[in-house]
Amino acid sequence: MQGNVSNQINIAAQEADKSSGAIDIRNLTDDQFLTLGLPTLVYVRKGMNEGRDVFAIHAANGQMMGIAEDPETVFSAITEHQMVAMTIH
């Protein structure tokens, strides 16, 4: 009986995902996983460019998207383009 209820819940969740356009992340292909969050999720890294300190915006896959000389400009650009800055460790 317990397995039957659990199976019904899983089926209902799958149907809800289909109707909402959600993706079941447990079944992502390698290509889907590599593009997960692109280009919405970004991170900021401090670096050097031509001898100057700069702050670079990087996409979730590590590709640099832009640079600025101060963090305020970087975070303004992130907000303006409706991106989400993530913390990396």
Image (cartoon, rainbow, N blue to C red):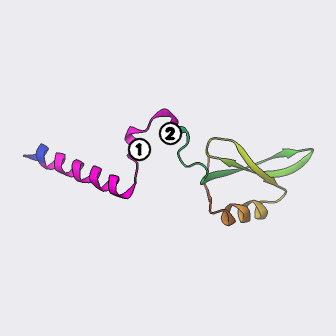
- Residue drawn at x 77%, y 64% is 72
Dot 2 or dot 1, earlier in sequence: 1
Residue 77 spot, x, y in % from top left: 73, 62
Amino acid type assigned to the residue bearing label 1 in the image: Ile
Please state if 82 lies on the left or on the right of 53 as rendered.
left
Q: Could you tell me which secondary element the residue under label 2 belongs to?
A: helix
Please state if 82 lies on the left or on the right of 1 as rendered.
right
Depth check: give the residue in front, 53 or 74: 74
- Residue drawn at x 52%, y 45% is 36
Report if residue 30 lies within the magenta region.
Answer: yes
Image quadrant containing the C terminus: top right
Mark 2, Cα crowd under 10 Å, few <14 / some 14-19 / many 20+, is few
Residue situated furthest right in the rendering: 51
Residue 52 spot, x, y in % from top left: 90, 49
Residue 10 spot, x, y in % from top left: 23, 48
Report if residue 29 lies within the magenta region.
Answer: yes
Say above or below: 17 vs 35. Answer: below
- Residue drawn at x 67%, y 62% is 81
Q: Quadrant of residue 29?
A: top left
Q: How far is the residue under mark 2 from the one under mark 1?
A: 8 Å
Disc 1: which residue: 25
Please state if 64 lies on the left or on the right of 61 as rendered.
right
Disc 2: which residue: 33
Magenta stretch, residue numbers = 5-32
- Residue drawn at x 11%, y 45% is 4
Amino acid type assigned to the residue bearing label 2 in the image: Phe
Please state if 22 lies on the left or on the right of 60 as rendered.
left
Q: Could you tell me which secondary element the residue under label 1 belongs to?
A: helix
Residue 79 spot, x, y in % from top left: 66, 65
